[in-house]
Image (tube, grey):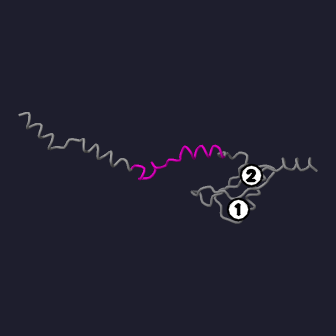
Amino acid sequence: MGAKESKTSHFYQEYEVFSKKTEKGSMQHQFSLLAPNHEMALSMAQENFMRREDVADIWVVKRENIYGLTSEERQLLTQRLENKDYRTTKGYGYLRSKWREKQQGMLDEKEIMSWKEVKK
């Protein structure tokens, strides 16, 4: 019994089905299915999905060919991108005081013109 289960589990592969409703629409995951090969997976996806809804395109992808972040990679990425203040206006609050400092250090037209009078 164990050998038969093992043989069956290798016969079927997991596939993910994606579709889009219009040519300009984006692909969306619809469901998963088990099939012996990609031709059968596509046929099953068409029979079970496309006959029920209008679909512009359909993709069938073997699950093992879809890659994502591991929980460790996701955690590292989250830590690295944790400070997102630069994406909001409050992240630039310090600029107002810096601008004031620069303006105070700048010379205005009256001051520059007064130099000309002194040199006479």
Q: Residue at x 57, y 57 (%)?
A: 24
Mark 1 highlights which residue? 50
Mark 2 highlights which residue? 15
- Looking at the figure, which quarter contains the C terminus? top left
Q: Is residue 18 above or below residue 104?
A: below
Q: Residue furthest top?
A: 119
Mark linked to residue 14: none
Residue 54 vs residue 114, the one in the foreground:
114
Question: Is residue 82 shown in magenta?
Answer: yes
Q: Residue at x 68, y 65 (%)?
A: 53
Residue 58 on image: x %, y %: 67, 55
The amino acid marked with disc number 2 is Tyr
The amino acid marked with disc number 1 is Met
- Asked whether, in this view, residue 97 is left or right of residue 63, the answer is left
- Asked whether, in this view, residue 52 is left or right of residue 93, the answer is right
Q: Closer to the observer: label 2 or label 1?
A: 2
Q: Residue at x 68, y 53 (%)?
A: 59
Residue 65 on image: x %, y %: 71, 45
Q: What is the C-alpha distance between the residues marked 2 and 1?
A: 16 Å
Secondary-structure class at tag 2: strand
